[in-house]
Every structure is written in structure tokens, then in C-alpha cells.
Image (tube, rainbow, N blue to C red):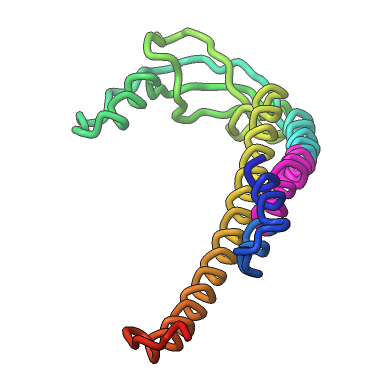
Amino acid sequence: MRMIWGLWRWRRNPLRRKTDVLEACAALVAAVLILLVAPAVGWTSGSLAHGALMKAAQKQRAERHPLSATVVKVLPHPPIDSDPETASARDAHRRVLARWTGPDGSRHEGTLGAHPGADPGERFRIWTDDHGSPVGRPLDTATAATHAVLAGIGAAGVTVVLVDGARRLVVWRLMRRRYTQWGIAWERAGQDWGRADADS
């Protein structure tokens, strides 16, 4: 709103310079781009990301299978680490030796992460590929939607930063031009400065 008022204020002002009008126009164009283009970029990016993530989630659900694994033996904790993030990750999972049967009927045994209270003989859920190799759980719809929203917000934010950066660059160049013009004007005025007949 200030940009529009700035343009209107400079419309018929006798002290108006060309750089003043250009600065107000740059601010107005930047405001319009931020209000119209940034949301459109955000919406488009979010929609494209959502489509890609939903396809990836659908593909993962088709290729990954939930199975039950049986704890054979609980493995000892690794040595204590002083890093709190590593320690919290270690406490959230317990390493166990487990057995499971893959979707193709093949038998497997290996080290897996289970919940902290896992005991021998206990069954827990894992995800495997078609051959029974352990994989991460597939991307769920809520996570895909959240990532798509974040991608849209990020794209809109980047657009706003770029537009505002371009506006600031234009204003900086206009200010340099103003200072140059002021310097030339002061040099002209300096030749007659202090003379008694300077006004005549």
C-alpha cells in the first residue's frame, strides 16, 4: 500500500526525480509479484511435489512387504557414546538377531533393530523387498502431503526472497545514480559558492 501511495504522492510533485518514480515502480512491481507470483509458484511446486511423492509412495507400497520377524537373540548395546543424539537413537532401538521368511518363501536371518524391550521368541514387524531383504517402511500419505506442503512453502519463500533481492538491487543502483547526480550538482554549485553575486 505504501508503494501505491508513494507513486500517487510523486505524481505531480515538482521535486520529483526520475529515480523516485522508478524506485516507487520497482516497489509496486515487487509487491504485485510477491502477492500473485509467489503463491502461484508455491502452489505449482507443492502440487508437482505431491504428485511425485504419491507416485513414489505407491511404488514403495507395491515393492515392500510387511512381515513378522522372530527375535532369536538380543545383542548387547554398543559402547556408550558421549553424543546425546547417538545415545537417544541407540536407546530408541535394540539390536537383535532375528529370523524371518521372505515373500518368496526364502528364509533369512540377520541383525535388525527392534523396540527396546524385545525378548527372545518375540515377534515384531519388519518391511522387506520381494526377495526378503530388509528395507525401510514405505512412505505414507500423510508424510508425502507434509513434504509437498513444505516444498510449496519453500518455493514460495525462495520466490519472495528473489523478488525482494531484485527490488533491493534496483533501489541500490538508483541510489548510486542519485548520489552521482548530487555530486555533479554540488560541483556546479561549488564554483559559485560564497560569492556575493552568486544569486544574480
Foreground of the two, 8 or 84: 8
Q: Residue 8, image x and y in percent?
A: 71, 49
Of all residues, the one furthest to the bottom in this rendering is: 191
Give the residue at x 39% y 91%: 191
Give the residue at x 38% y 19%: 92
Residue stretch rendered in magenta on the structure: 26-46
Foreground of the two, 140 or 3: 3
Foreground of the two, 42 or 67: 42
Q: Say if residue 49 shows up in the picture.
A: no
Q: Is residue 196 above or below residue 75?
A: below
Tell me which corner region of the image, top left, top right, bottom left or bottom right, holds residue 53.
top right
Give the residue at x 67% y 20%: 66
Horizontal side of residue 50 vs 83, given as left or right: right
Characterize the magenta stretch by its predominant secondary structure. helix
* Residue 164 falls within the magenta-colored stretch: no
Foreground of the two, 6 or 159: 6
Q: Residue 32, image x and y in percent?
A: 74, 47
Q: Residue 169, image x and y in percent?
A: 56, 65
Q: How many marks?
A: 0
Q: In which quadrant of the rendered image does the N terminus lie? A: top right
Give the residue at x 60% y 15%: 68
Q: Say if residue 174 shows up in the picture.
A: yes
Horizontal side of residue 76 vs 100, given as left or right: left
Q: Residue 55, image x and y in percent?
A: 80, 37
Tell me which corner region of the image, top left, top right, bottom left or bottom right, holds residue 18.
bottom right
* Residue 30 falls within the magenta-colored stretch: yes
Q: Is residue 195 above or below residue 177?
A: below
Tell me which corner region of the image, top left, top right, bottom left or bottom right, holds residue 43.
top right
Q: Is residue 128 above or below residue 200?
A: above
